[in-house]
Amino acid sequence: MIALLVLAFVVRDVRAQYQPEPEIPVQQQTTDSFINGKLAYTIHRSEGGGDPIRPEPGYFDDLVVSVFQDAGLPYVIAEQAPWKRVMEQAMQGARHVIYPTTRTADREDSFKWVGPISRTIWNLYGYADAKWQNMPFEKILASARIGVLLGSAREPYLRRRGAQQLVLVPREDLLLPMLQADRVDLIAIGGSVLRHYRDIVDPSAQQRDIDGVLPYRSCFLYMAISNAAPVDEVETLQNSLDKNKKSGQFIELRKKHGLSSDTDSAFLRAMLNLDNNGVACLDLFGRDD
């Protein structure tokens, strides 16, 4: 019943049916904040922050705040808002910070970047016993109903690759209930995020195993900062993050939040290798290594 109620907010096509929340006027969205007379950065809480799924303070929130504190740059914390809205604020404003943000070619010139702060494997998830498991990627895109977060980097990428039936949602926590209610065949969501949402849905809906159908892209995640931010301050933030990694603070923060701290893992080797600064996304062609 809970899943069905949640689905009342789901729409099939944003241009035709989805009515977004009333937008804050641009002049209010981009209002600058000052601390001791100095223009401050507005740090937008990571998605999921403040709710029972990922209680504050969250890992990414703590990491970003520590980077700003070590850099000595003033900041204010903004309450969580829909992802599409904060993307627009960051693009239009002077010193907005959003994270974790996928660094893609179409976003490259819209922001300044500090990172990477994480990496994700893009996978299509569905029921393990469904027909999609053994299909080529192109055939899946041509015939499956795929749920994806509105405004996410996955949406335009899947369109470019040939997805014919994208089902857009305003919040990613709607994706799993949609799959369970047979509103979509597959969902485009991060595996770690999916595990969070599986913990809070109706257990009676978990009778079929959900598995990754096809890993199709590997992307590094960054802090995306308004393009108007001064270059020297962005460089200071990058240096602060690099120092965080080299000093061991990066690993200690992961331990604090119960995350993997195995520095021999492929993920953390990639995170701690400063040669990966600036790396964006790579296609996997069905491999996740």
Image: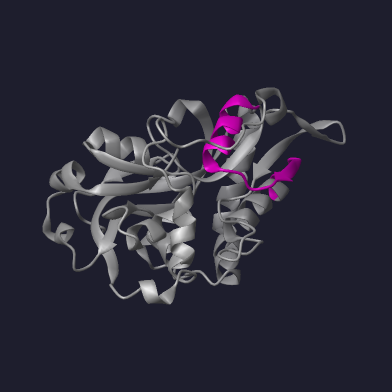
Q: How is the image coloured?
A: one colour
**Relative height, residue 104 to residue 209 (above, below):** above
Left or right side of 128 for 151: right
Q: Say which of 237 and 128 sits in front.
A: 128
Give residue 245's position: percent from left, percent from top: 55, 56
Query: Which residue ends up furthest to the right in the rendered image?
Result: 36
Quadrant the C terminus occupies = bottom left
Res 203 → quadrant: bottom left
Residue occupying image coordinates x 41% and y 43%: 11
**Relative height, residue 30 to residue 146 (above, below):** above
Decide whether residue 182 is among the magenta residues. no
Q: How many marks?
A: 0
**Relative height, residue 146 to residue 125 (above, below):** above
Give residue 146's position: percent from left, percent from top: 29, 48
Give residue 53's position: percent from left, percent from top: 55, 65
* Camera sees residue 123: no
Q: Say which of 178 and 129 sits in front.
A: 178
Residue occupying image coordinates x 53% and y 36%: 20
Give residue 272's position: percent from left, percent from top: 46, 56
Q: Say which of 10 and 286 sits in front.
A: 10
Decide whether residue 76 is among the magenta residues. yes
* Camera sees residue 64: yes
Q: Which residues are magenta?
A: 70-93
Res 247 → quadrant: bottom right
